[in-house]
Image (cartoon, coloured by chain):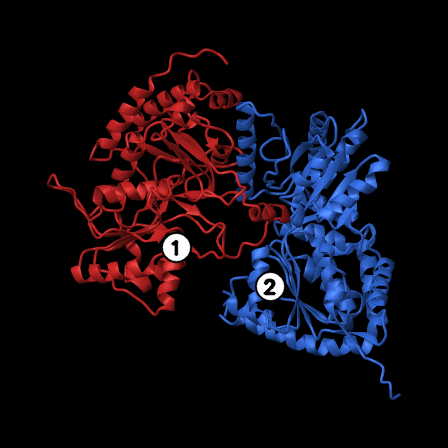
Chain colours: A red, B blue
Amino acid sequence: MQTHSAPPSRQSLDRQVLDWMAEPLWRFDEERFDSLARRLFAFQFEHCPAYGRFCEGRGFNPDNVSHWTQIPPVPTGAFKEVELRCFPANRTVRTFRTSGTSGQKRGALPLDTLDVYEASLIPTLEHLLFPDFKTDSIEPWRLPMCILAPTGHENPDSSLSHMFDQLVQAHGSMETRYVVHQGALDLETVQQTQDRIRASGDPWVLLGTAFSFVHLLEDMTRQGESWNCPPGSRVMETGGFKGQAREIPRAELHGWISEQMGIPSSRIINQYGMTELGSQFYDSTLVDPDGPRRKLGPPWVRVRILDPASLREVPPGDVGMVVIHDLANTGSIAAIETADLGRHILDPQGRPIGFEILGREPDAEQRGCSIAADEMLGRQNRPR
Amino acid sequence: MKIQWPDENQERLNAARGRLEVAREILLNRGTQSVLAVLAQVLDDWQQAGSPWRARLAQELDGAGGFPADLTRAGLKLGLETWSGDALRETIEREQSALLSGSGRRWVSFSSTHIVLAGAIPMPSLLQPILSLACLSPVLVKPSSRDPITAPLLAESIRAVDEEIGTALEVVSFPSHDDAGLNLFLEAPCIVASGHDATIRSLATRLQSTARLVPYGHRLSIEVIDSESLTDDVSGLAQDIAFDVVLWDQQGCLSPAGLYVVGPGAAEGVARLGPAIAAALEDLGETLPPGAVETEAATQIVHERDQATLRSAAGDPPAVLAGANTSWTVVLEGDSTWRPCPGHRFLRLYPVEETRELENALAPIGPHLSSAALVALPERRAAFADRLLALGATRICRPGRMQAPPLDWPHDGQSLLAPLVRITQQEPDPAL
């Protein structure tokens, strides 16, 4: 590999990213993003040799990248096969892994610090899931939460459980409960908590994977239960249905939640995230109830929609491959190529104001036996 | 302005079912030999090189966003090579005599057979209705959204030979998410369904408990090359393999999803074959250009290519050879770990140095195997074939012939006719 100009230190990069994350007002500063992204690229190019060689193979290095959009992204699937870290293995403090059945390779995101990871997730949650809660005093606001997932202690590999732990620590009230233990949903605890919350009138926050909500809703339906959650209550669901016995379109799931729990659809938020990313995206309906539902993320992340054939950006609003550039990934790789399809949502002037992830059409039939067989064999399994 | 009434699909289905009740009587009155003669003539018409049906299918499929006309022409030419009227007669007679061997046996046709087609390849859409009609069961077909052409064209070609028999094949298109329409469609004594295993499981739960379901779930095929059979010049073999990959743009169960070089020097074999196959794919791209690749599939191709490139950058062996855009991809793997195949002319070559490791290498895909193209030294061919068949393959062929199964190939290991009829037995009365 050629010698390139000395990259910035990890410490200084982390500091700049953390400073950005700590700013209470979000500013989507393009110059700042570009500058930081290119410096981070120089660091990652140098300290992750596999990535450096991958970029060289594409003809890109820190000396010839003049804009962050030229930085080569790595496919999410590579996290299953290659250790994509920019620090010595012995400095790993935590490794988050993608889910997967036994025998399958699982993607891994090793971290040498949780500082940047945690600094990214809390302000993003505050801005996009709790925009109506502000702290005026030293004491943070707290809400009762129902976590439809195991704790991080029970499931240390899960970035989602870690995220819930952080959220509970920052904003969970004493009434907060984790209701999944050893893979089983504790419906009795959910019911008891619901009774208490209803009596108190406090808004309730339910968070979990999409499929855990399906289990809860099925249990509620079986028992003839329906709730009328207090005003301000909200739901955050995430992940897909791969590997599950059945798949429910997201709109249908939201309708079911709304009907069964008495929470309006605008307060049911889908989170789009993945183990390989330090930052997450949330539906816009709490911050922009009148606008189209779309995914929003923090200012230290950018999303591009590319034509997979040409790897150029598609015309605004067209469908393409979702590529994410996340500055929170300081210790691994910032530019991530997902296997998801998406499109930008545009404002009346045709400017992107967010994006949406596209699932397969309900009428979509098999595209080919070979591909479907891959699905049977667990082609991608990236829910966290 | 066209008004689509909410129950229009159900009305069309009911009307088609009504017509098939009449057609059922026609089939029974005409009898097996007469119906078979018509169907044999239809196949002969399709088999002719200058068949207007083939020309129309190629043209109209292209126009409907399916395969490019040249690709369809090449696929039909090879696929129909042995599908003659005589082959149909022989197959039906042989299967019938096998089914009826035993005292007092008869077969009884179903009052109707409803066929759910899937995928984009015309060959199953041609054969499946013909087999059901040969059993004297009138047929209602739901074509796949990716091939709305073949089934109606087949119906037209039957009517051209015999207007009366032609009434026994009805084609009704409607979206799969039309639950009421689908439930109505599934009200039949015999359902033949192709598609995702999950789709077939879901269909099975909707059927009447007495209905017969003939499922054709997902399968994939492979090429297996005995390393010691490789000669200095691998270009001919590479061309055959590339042809298997190119036909139907690798979208079917019979397309190779991977190639295994097995035996001593397997890695070297992969290294020699890979570039030769890549060159052949590039050449074939000139004469048989690929069809449009949907964004989702293109995304998978890019993802798998990049993943292999990154593994290579990390010091692992895979090498990626690729054509412009997503036109074709050859990945030379360093080991035999099964990896996804996104189709659209994407082939991985796996080395298996120890022949005894073949079972382990194929274990993840064994239950899904359909065909295996095999090249081996003559003295080892039978042993290789036995092992592949034991693993789950139901057909062994030569490279270059993967898309040309004979008409009597027991698809997915099933007899062709047995699932489509009821076999009955009348015991002799000792008093007589």
What's the mark number on residue B173? 2
Look at 29% across and 58% down and name the residue there.
A189
Look at 66% across and 73% down and name the residue there.
B189
Q: Position of residue B134 (x, y in %)?
A: 79, 67
Side of B179 relative to A96 (left or right)? right
Position of the C terminus of chain A by quadrant:
top left
- Label 2: which secondary element: loop
What's the mark number on residue A184? 1
- Quadrant of the rendered image containing residue B358: top right
- Quadrant of the rendered image containing residue B209: bottom right
Q: Of residues B389 and A55, which is closer to you in this image?
A: B389
Q: Of residues A291 and A372, which is closer to you in this image?
A: A372
What's the mark number on residue B342? none
Q: Position of residue A217 (x, y in %)?
A: 37, 61
Q: Of residues A219 and A332, which is closer to you in this image?
A: A219
Query: How many residues crowd around disc 1 within 10 Å: few (fewer than 14), some, or many (20 or more)?
Result: few
* Three-letter code, disc 1: Ala
For disc 1, the chain is: A
Query: How many residues crowd around disc 2 within 10 Å: few (fewer than 14), some, or many (20 or more)?
Result: some
